[in-house]
Image (spheres, grey):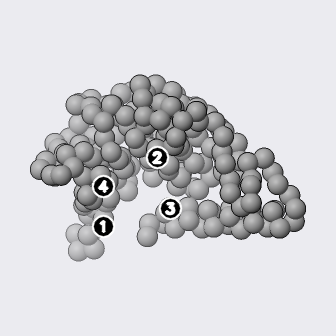
Amino acid sequence: MTKSYSFGLAVLFVFVLLVQNSLAQGNNPVGLDEGRITLRGHTSGVSSLSFSPDGRTLASGSNDATIRLWDVVALREKSRLTGHAGLVNSVTFSPDGKTLASSNEDVRMWDVASGREKEPLEGHMRAFFALTFSPDGSTLAACLADIHLWDVASRREKPRLRGHSPSAYTVGWSLNAETEKYRLYPIR
């Protein structure tokens, strides 16, 4: 497990324990119902979730064409990101937590602190199933029938990884212990 993933799970576990303790003491803060937490804001179903690397922010992409950033400690909405024309298929944080990428018929990148959209990515855009940043944050990968790659700094598309039939539904990076380099793996 990566360090940020492990930390995110630990934060989520502590969060669940706090909720259970609060309910056991008879407290029921807004959004809590018998151990369930409901963050209200989207007007349609949620299609994608991603925790920030520090575990304090949850991004939710929805069928209502919005992305919400939630403060999971205070249980409140931090910001609403708009710009997609429809269903937000995927949301993912960069490893440093400063950038959020989202996909619909296009891929957008957002500054998490300000909620503003960053400069658009170059290249062919489609309705991608999933997005993921490389562990160093330098490359963004998006999957469909081909894996599309972008250099995050220049916003330019890199050569695609072709030939995934049927489509890849998600992708993940893996560290090769011998070469100490990361490799991208499509998952069907």
Secondary structure, mark 3, is helix
Q: Position of residue 183 (x, y in %)?
A: 24, 61
Mark 2 vs mark 3: give the one in front: 2
Q: Which residue is mark 1?
A: 175
Percent across and percent down for residue 144 are: 24, 45
Residue that mark 4 sits on: 171
Q: Amino acid at mark 4?
A: Val
For badge 2, the amino acid type reads Ser
Judging depth in this view, the residue of 87 and 139 nearest the camera is: 87
Q: Earlier in the sequence, mark 2 or mark 3?
A: 3
Pointer 3: what residue? 4
Dot 2 corresponds to which residue? 48
Q: Nearer the viewer, mark 2 or mark 1?
A: 2
Residue at x 32% of width, y 58% of height: 172
Q: Residue furthest right?
A: 26
Q: Are marks 2 and 3 in contact (CB under 8 Å)?
A: no
- What whole-number distance in Å separates the C-alpha atoms at marks 2 and 3? 19 Å
Q: Which residue: 58% across, 40% down?
A: 69
Counting from the top left corner in percent of width and height, residue 49 is at 50, 49
Task: Tell me the kind of residue under disc 3.
Answer: Ser
Q: Is residue 96 visible?
A: no
Task: Name the residue at the bottom extreme.
Answer: 178
| Number of numbered markers | 4
Quarter of the figure that contains the C terminus: bottom left
Q: Amino acid at mark 1?
A: Leu
Mark 1 vs mark 4: give the one in front.
Answer: 4
Sequence order check, earlier mark of 2 and 4: 2
Question: Mark 4, residues whose alpha carbon is within 10 Å: few (<14), some, or many (≥20)?
Answer: many
